[in-house]
Amino acid sequence: MSGIAAGIGAAVSIGTAIWKGSKAKKAARKAEQEKARVARQIAAFENSRQAVINPYAGVTSLAGLATDLSENLSNPFANLGVATSAAEIQMEQTDIALANTLDTLQATGASAGGATALAQAAARSKKSVAASIETQEAANDKLQAQGEQRLQEQQNAEKARIQGIEISEGSRAQNAAAQGAAFKFGAQEERDNAKLDRLAGGMDQARQDASNANAAQGAIGSALIGSLGNIAAGAAAGMGGGSDT
């Protein structure tokens, strides 16, 4: 009876081992399939990742915004002339004064000395007026030239200021665009790396599951061999007992 009981127990163990082995085999196959699936997903994701960029690729030189303003410069004093109109007035008025004096002398019969003195007085008067006019004209020309010079300086200073703003703002806009592109690229890289980490974790788990299933299959196979050995030993023992009887 003990041999029969041992055989039954061994048969039960074999059946259990076979069932567990089948279950472990399915688990191993499922783990391998999951590992392959995750590997394909990782490969597809890596192939679709954004290309590495140069955020400063679109930066261009702003040197063209800087222009030479020297062509706008001129010497406002270059064409200052001598005021001759006053001198011409002076000579005309002197001639007129002398002519009038002679007419007066002829009409009144005055002496030549009186005529000369009168002519000299008239000439001095006209000369003084002419000198005053000439001084005013020269002063006006100088003031106009100084005003023109001041205007040119202010205009060129304003043009230089505008150029400086354009260059500065152009550079700032380009830097902002480059920094924005770099930030966007970096943010996407962080997301992609986080997703790859999750996929890698799934791959590690699939590998561990496959390893565990394969180890379970090995253990079940060893147990099955042991059970078969027990059955063989029990059968041999039963056969030996029957011959003694």
Image: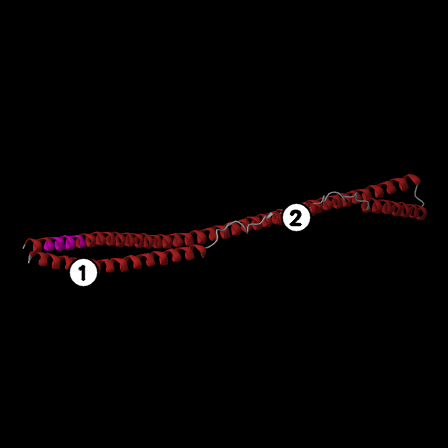
User: Where does residue 237 sit, x and y in percent of width and height?
Assistant: 11, 53
The answer to which image quadrant residue 80 occupies is top right
Q: What secondary structure is marked by label 1?
A: helix
**Quadrant position of the C terminus in the picture:** bottom left
Amino acid on which the number 1 mark rests in the picture: Gly
User: Does residue 30 appear left or right of residue 132 in this picture?
Assistant: left
**What label sits on residue 67 in the rendered view?**
none
| Tag nearer the camera, 1 or 2 | 1
Q: Is residue 146 above or below residue 15?
A: above
Separation (CA) of disc 1 from disc 2: 110 Å
Say which residue appears at 89% left-offset and 48% top-offset: 100
**What label sits on residue 151 in the rendered view?**
2
Chief SS of the magenta region: helix
**Highlighted magenta segment, given as a residue range:** 228-239
Q: In front here: 104 or 193? A: 193
Q: Report the colour scheme.
A: secondary structure
73 part of magenta stretch = no
Q: Which residue is mark 1?
A: 15
Asked if labels 2 and 1 touch by Cβ distance under 8 angstroms, the answer is no
Q: In front here: 65 or 175? A: 175
User: Where does residue 72 sit, x and y in percent of width and height?
Assistant: 69, 47
Q: What secondary structure is marked by label 2?
A: helix
